[in-house]
Image (cartoon, rainbow, N blue to C red):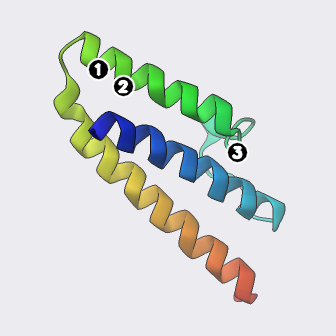
Amino acid sequence: MLGIAFVGFNIIDAYLTGLCLAMGALELNTIMINIGDSLLIKGLAALAIVAGLYWFSKEKLLYPLCLAMFGVCLWNSAVYTLLKVGAV
């Protein structure tokens, strides 16, 4: 279940990042600067991480990863809202 949540949070992150980039925001993550808004790449990368964690019996790491991605999604939502109302 946490694996599905992690993949979902990554897809939501990519979607919100794409919205924010279209409104003039900048990608802060230098690793994802060229692919930060690609739903397919983010989804596949998250799926590979989940598979690797289960393969190596480290699925407990999904708890902090999901929490971190939830925070990223909240941040992106806040940035999108501020851009939408013209506060930034």
Kindly identify which numbered label has been placed on residue 50: 2
Which three-letter amino acid code belongs to the residue tagged 1? Leu
**Which of the image's four quarters has the C terminus?**
bottom right
Which three-letter amino acid code belongs to the residue tagged 3? Asp
Position of 86 with respect to 14 (left or right) is: right
Q: What percent of the width, then of the height, locates residue 45?
A: 53, 26
Residue visible at 75% across and 36% down in the picture: 34
Q: What percent of the width, then of the height, locates residue 39?
A: 66, 39
Contact, CB < 8 Å: mark 1 with mark 2?
yes
Dividing the picture into quarters, in which one does residue 37 lie?
top right
Dividing the picture into quarters, in which one does residue 22 lie?
bottom right
Relative height, residue 76 to residue 6 (above, below) = below
Which three-letter amino acid code belongs to the residue tagged 2? Val
Task: Look at mark 1 in the image and give the residue it sits on.
Answer: 53
Q: What percent of the width, then of the height, locates residue 27?
A: 68, 52
Residue visible at 23% across and 11% down in the picture: 56
Kindly identify which numbered label has been placed on residue 37: 3
Contact, CB < 8 Å: mark 1 with mark 3?
no
Residue visible at 71% across and 36% down in the picture: 35
